[in-house]
Image (tube, rainbow, N blue to C red):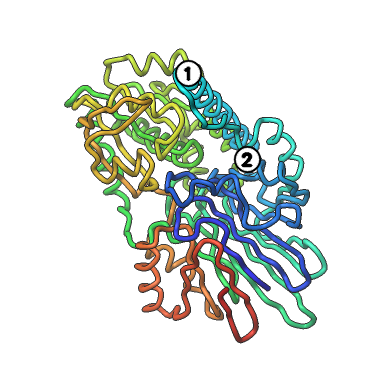
Amino acid sequence: MEVKFCGAAQEVTGSCHFITLDNGFKIVLDCGLYQGRSKHMENFNSTWLFDPKEVDCLILSHAHIDHSGRLPKLVKDGFRGHIVCTHATRSLCAIMLLDSAKIQERDAEYYNKRLLKKKNKKSNSKKKREPLYNSDDVAETMKHFMGVAYDKWYRLNDHLEVLFRDAGHILGSASVTLRLQDGEKTVDFGFTGDIGRPDRPILRDPVPMPEVDYLICESTYGAKDHLNKPAETERFLEIIKHTCIEKRGKLIIPAFSVGRTQEIVYMLDQMETKGLLPRIPVYVDSPLAVNATQVFGAHPECFDEKLNEYLLIDDNPFGFNRLTYVRSVTLSKRLNETKDACIIISSSGMMNAGRVRHHLFNSIDQEKNTLLIVGYCSPDTPGGMLRNGIKELKLFGEIKPVKMEIEIMDSFSAHADRNEILEFISNQKKLKKLFLVHGEKKSQEALKGMLNENGFPDVEIPKLGQKFELADEALESK
């Protein structure tokens, strides 16, 4: 068999891996959008390193857009097979892909209006921008989805089975194990997807994969250790009190609509129940987050024991008296204008799209406000620039000084840190080769060194487009 790395190779977004079996059957693992602005990746989302028409099956680890966001483009360009995933992933993709399509349609419309203005003023050779896909393409894509349960082998054909196990990353997230039969020989191939963190709120802990011969493993936080409880809760409360009580400012939390937002709301709900949360309004300003929270309620099979016990005390862990879910644009605009102390949770997490950019625009130049970054941001996104200490940021064509406080809490991340990654794969005793993906090169090199020291001597960091032939005794790079 051959594996080709077609995304998230020495990058954190755009997950996509192409496998060709000896019998010619072709599988794609994930099909995500690249969400950064790197020059060498600028054509990634619109091009393929394989022919979509030739793909027999797509296996999706979870619903985050950097893993699922190019699926409608794949179908639009000729893919006609099944998209196999867990039931909860299918439910989330139905709302997330539609949201992605609408964002692209609005972005293309905005770009084309600006282009028309420039053309009216002077000659301009730039072409109109088209969205990668639209809402109709998403509707067509959803017809290809096939939801399956955790912990059951599903037969794709006479020679191939797939197993999903709970990865504990977001609702419905899974590791993927492929079992290939070649005569009397069996080859097991694994893909971790995004590995979650043990003892996190809402979701069950990551479940170890079966032993495999070859493994593709994520490495987002391959060089870091996260904070753990209770330090995390105490730090979060400190930031809330400092911003909203002492400075009477806004605490803006850019958060992915699926997973991160629900975890933050659940933590605030627990603080409220215990009487710890200051009496300030909290807003979740994201229509997608509202819809996603409803999907969470429809999939209690993914909840951990602690949340099920908490439901006996509070039947709505994602809502309390001073919490408002914002759908309307009108109310969102009012939040931009208000001078009152409050917490605003809004997408996107990297601040490269969505309503959070408007909140940032209206708050970034005021010292009383705080931006709390709660997860990874690609270096060339607004979130990544702010993490790295940039002093000015261009938003909506205007250069704004960065005067608000910037706080970072990576412990909120749904990605395992380096020790949690090591623990997750510690049962892999028969592994012949391990590939690191979904990480920056620096993190991958650090994790590779750690893995080498802990019983994993054969670790590869593939480049974009690199191929490997996998055989019984040999592994060849092309």
**Disc marking residue 41:** none
Image spot of residue 140 (x, y percent)? 74, 37
Give the residue type at disc 2: Cys
> At 25% across and 42% down in the image, what residue appears?
235
Whether residue 211 is visible, yes or no, is no
Q: Earlier in the sequence, mark 1 or mark 2?
A: 2
Quarter of the image containing the N terminus? bottom right
Q: Is residue 178 above or below residue 103?
A: below
Give the residue type at disc 1: Lys
- The image quarter in which residue 165 lies: bottom right
**Disc marking residue 93:** 2
Farthest residue toward the bottom?
473
> At 24% across and 27% down in the image, what residue appears?
369
> In the image, 414: left or right of 76?
left
Farthest residue toward the front?
123
Local SS, label 1:
helix
> At 64% across and 61% down in the image, what residue appears?
18
Residue identified by numbered label 1: 117
Q: Nearer the viewer, mark 1 or mark 2?
A: 1
Q: Is residue 240 above or below residue 248?
A: below
